[in-house]
Amino acid sequence: MEFRDDVRYASTHEWARREGDVVVCGISDYAQDSLGDVVFVQLPEVGVVKKRGEAFGVVESVKTTSDVHMPVSGKIVEINETLKERPDLLNTSPFEEGWLVKLQPTDPAELEELLSADDYRKYVEEEE
């Protein structure tokens, strides 16, 4: 299980990484491992504005269907179109090729309120 220091984590198992003026979001390695083989991903339309904690998409695996939540508030500026044809990228590359959305944050300070890799690791261990 990978816990990366270059991202921040939400307790709902999404990660967020600042890249210039945008924040890239995806699901954690723990989340993809818990879900099993991902077979479908539903993402929002570009331009949608959501608040931190609101659901913005759905990930369907062979085991279950799960909502994906905004780790920070913002406007969706790009979605990972590749996931329509290759939802398995969430399993094989959750932090790189399997990112979900890029957003323009409305409150960049929210990123700092997310969990560090060490804090997220502890959270996951307590959850199990």
Image: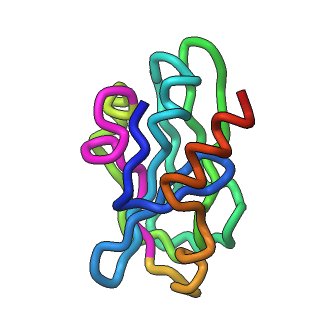
Picture coordinates of residue 12, whole percent (x, y): 67, 48
Colouring chosen for the image of the structure: rainbow
Q: Nearer the viewer, residue 114 or 122?
A: 122
- Residue 26 part of the magenta segment: no
Taking the view exactly as shown, the residue that stands out farthest to the top is 62
- From the viewer's perspective, tell me whether residue 77 is left or right of residue 42: left
Q: How many marks?
A: 0
Viewer-proximal residue among 81 and 52: 52
Image quadrant assignment for residue 84: top left
- Residue 70 vertical placement versus 100 (above, below): below
Q: Please, what is the dominant secondary structure of the magenta stretch?
A: loop
**Height in image: 91 above or below 117?**
above
What is the x, y in percent for residue 27? 49, 44
Question: Which quadrant: the C terminus?
Answer: top right
Occupied quadrant, residue 52:
bottom right
What x and y, as percent, mark residue 58? 59, 40
Q: Quadrant of the N terminus?
A: top left
The magenta segment is: 91-103
At a point 38% along the width and 30% down the height, the residue shown is: 87
* Residue ID at (37%, 73%): 18
Quarter holding residue 123? top right
Q: In this rendered view, identify the residue nearer to me: 3 or 45.
A: 3
- Which residue sits at x=55%, y=70%? 48
Q: Position of residue 55 (x, y in %)?
A: 68, 54
Residue visible at 38% across and 27% down? Answer: 91
Camera-nearest residue between 17 and 117: 117
Q: Is residue 56 left or right of residue 97?
A: right
Relative vertical location of residue 108 with respect to residue 94 in this rendering, above or below: below
